[in-house]
Structure formats: structure tokens, C-alpha cells
Amino acid sequence: MEKLISQFFDIPDAHLLPVYLEHGGYEAAKFMFQNLKPQDVELEVKKSSLRGLGGAGFGSGMKWSFVPRNTGKPIYLTVNADEGEPGTFKDRFVITHAPHLLLEGILICAYAVGIHKVYIYIRGEYEIQFERLNQAIQEAIEKNYLGKNILASGFDLEVIVHKGAGAYICGEETALLESLEGKKGFPRLKPPFPAAVGLFGCPTVIHNVETLSYLPFILKRSGEWFAKLGSPNNGGLRLFSVSGHVANPGIYERPLGIPLKQLIEDAGGVRSGRRLKAVVPGGLSASVLTASEIDVKMDFDSLRAIGSMGGSAGVIIMDDTACMVKALYVTMRFFGHESCGQCSPCREGTGWVSRILKRMVDGHGRPSDIDNLLDIGSFMGGTTICALADGAQMPLLSYLKKFRSEFEYHIKEKKCDLEIQMTEVR
């Protein structure tokens, strides 16, 4: 299986510029400056079918084409390195082991769109990654891969790393912009969209770390080559964060479109030979899948077709020791805690749901609880400024509908129906 980004995870000191250069670093940028116009780069990325790998899955080249170039205002790139989605840890690996790959991808995007200033918004807890990024930026400036007149091309680029404060909501693109501007991380109403009115009221491109890190490979080996690595309209590879009840949790770089069943097998299968019970395929916000649904292809379109989503590719495996009532409680407790509180369906809905589930977990559930939860959940999606309520609605409704008998047993018997009791939720 060919490795692209993840090849750097196995190379000692790959985060250092000399080592990155030994393995083909900045060759794509050199080729770009010598041979390609900005519109050529955009066209190649469109051919690649590279989609946004932070969660939305929107076409990257198409996103660039929406940015107005003639407003008289500067155009910004903001890199979303906040990575707050539970079950997701791929960007941390990229920044730790291949910060220069990210910087080269940033340089390619900036050249294509006409951007001269970039902000990397990094998760506040990522201390080592924050230091490595700043070290890589200084190395790149010293060797003229960033800064003024890069590689004698006449192109200038400044990159600034901004540390967040640990708020999940700031992973939402407009809340991220608000935070960068020094304000509370409240999501913005859209339209206007960030492509037209983004950071400081200027046109802004927002990209995930992983998305940008694939750009050097696309320029080196062509967009058509990259597109063929994946499935139709889902080009290339993807870093899947596989965790939970598998034998070998970790990062797996696989083609978009790999069957979920194969991905689980690649991770060593379900731990200790136990039976698979459920899978969260795209971070905690995604609808849960049952063991009978794992033949699905792990691309954006296939997962959407069965009512879930590719999201951030945080794949959480649960075996037959997992209590779905407790799993949903922990999920909804998280969303309730991380809601910014701006919209009442999210603020109140996640709070109500969390409290009802906690009562159920504690053995005080009521016969009406399940229908009440379904009713609350039905009003949460599509009623708020950002998608946090939608991200809470998807697991809520899917857990209740697919594992309803477990919830009914909890309410009736005041206990879990598992043979092996899980550690009590604290």
C-alpha cells in the first residue's frame, strides 16, 4: 500500500528541513514556480478530486474558484489545525512528523489563490506541535522557502501560528475566524461565506491540515494520478484515525473508498476476538453504524448515502462489551459542554438530552424518556447557526433507533444488559 503523508511518520527527524529535503521536500514548490501559473495549479487540483478532509468534504479546487480576486482587499488563508473532534488525531501526527509538508502545501495554495498572509489556528493543547511548526517556519524562512521573493519567484508569503484555547466550537470555520480576530468564538451567520467575507472582512480560504498536505503530491505526480487513487469524485488517500476496541489502533492512510470492513481488518480486527457491535465512522458527530453496515465504502458520498458521514475520519470501534446507553451519554455530555450557547436548540437541546441520559445511566430512566429524546433530537438539526446541533443530532437519533432495545432494557431493569459490565461512568 503506497504511503504519501504517512511515509514521514516512519522517517527519523522528518520534521527537520534537511531531512525533508532529502526526501523530495519543496520539489513541488520549485516546479510550480518554474513552470506553472496560478490558474494551472487550480486546474490540477480540480482534476485531483481532492476534497476537504477536515469534515465538510467540499472540492478544494472548487473552493479556490469561489474566492474573488478583484476586491482590492488582501486574501487570507486560515489553516484549521484545531482538531477537536473526538476520535480524531491525524493532524497531530502530520504536524509532529511533517510540518514542512504542511508548509509546502500552504505555499502551493497561497500561490494559486494569490495569498500573501496565512494564519495557522492550532489547538491549544498541542504544545509540541506548536513548537515544531514555529521551528519549521523559521527553517523555511532561512532557506527562502517562505518570506520575501521565495525562490526568486517574486512571490512573498508570511505564515503565523495562532494558538487556540481549547474550545471545540472554534473548529467550526467561522468561529475560528472570530477567535482569530480576538473575539469570542461564536459561529457567524452565513451568507456571506468566508470565501467572500472572511477574516477581517476579506476573502478567505479555510483548509484543514491534511487537505493542504496532499497538494505537493498532486503537483509532483498530477491531479489525474491522485484522483485514480480514490473512488469517483473522492480523489486520493485519506488518514483514518482508528481507535477503540481494535487490536492495533493508530493512523491508517488508505484510499477514499476502502470498505470499512477492510479498514477494521487492517487495524488488526476487533480486540481479543470479540464480536463487533458498532462503529462511529467519521468522528463523534457521525451517525453510528451497526456491525451489519461495515461493507460501506469509506468515502464521503457512500457514507452519506447510508445516513452517516465521512466527517473527520475518526473511526471509533466498539465491541460487544460497549454499553450504547453510556456511549451516547458520554457523546451528548461532550456536545452539551462544548456548545457555545448562542442558539437555543443547541444550548437547551444538548443539555436536556445529556441530563435525561445521565438519569437513565444511573438507573432512574422513565418509560417516556426514549420518545422524549427522539422528539428533542428531531428539532435540533438545521435550526442553528452552525452544525454543532446537527453533529449532536446524528449520533443521538442513530443510537436510539439502532439500539433502542438496550435503552428500553436500561429503563425497565435499571441496569445494563451486558454480560460484562463496563466501568461506571463518572
Image (tube, rainbow, N blue to C red):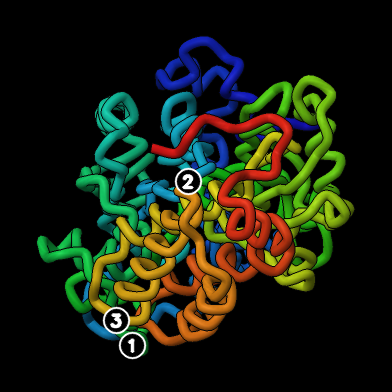
Quadrant occupied by the C terminus: top left
Residue 104 spot, x, y in % from top left: 46, 41
- Say which element carries label 1: loop
Mark closer to the chain start, 3 or 2: 2
Mark closer to the chain start, 1 or 3: 1
Residue 183 spot, x, y in % from top left: 11, 65
- Residue mark closest to the camera, 3 vs 2: 3
Q: Which residue is mark 2?
A: 86
Q: Which residue is mark 1?
A: 192
- Say which element carries label 2: loop
- The answer to whether 99 appears left or right of 136 in the picture is right
Residue depicted at 20% across the width and 67% down the height: 178
Quadrant occupied by the N terminus: top right
Residue 378 spot, x, y in % from top left: 54, 83
Residue furthest left in the image:
182
Query: Do callouts 1 and 2 mark residues in contact (Cβ within 8 Å)?
Result: no
Compared to residue 49, the image places residue 27 above or below, namely above
The amino acid type, in three-letter code, at marker 2 is Pro
Quarter-wise, where is residue 408 in the image? bottom right
- Residue mark closest to the camera, 1 vs 2: 2
Mark closer to the chain start, 1 or 2: 2
Q: Report, in whole angstroms, how far the alpha carbon at label 3 lies from the one at label 2.
A: 23 Å
Residue depicted at 28% across the width and 58% down the height: 116
Badge 1 crowding class, 10 Å Cα cut-off, few under 14, some 14 to 19, many 20 or more, is few
Quarter-wise, where is residue 409 in the image? bottom right
Q: Report, in whole angstroms, how far the alpha carbon at label 1 lies from the one at label 3.
A: 22 Å
Compared to residue 318, the image places residue 58 above or below, namely below
The amino acid type, in three-letter code, at marker 1 is Pro
Badge 3 crowding class, 10 Å Cα cut-off, few under 14, some 14 to 19, many 20 or more, is some
Q: Which residue is mark 3?
A: 344
Q: Can residue 100 be seen from the camera position used here? A: no
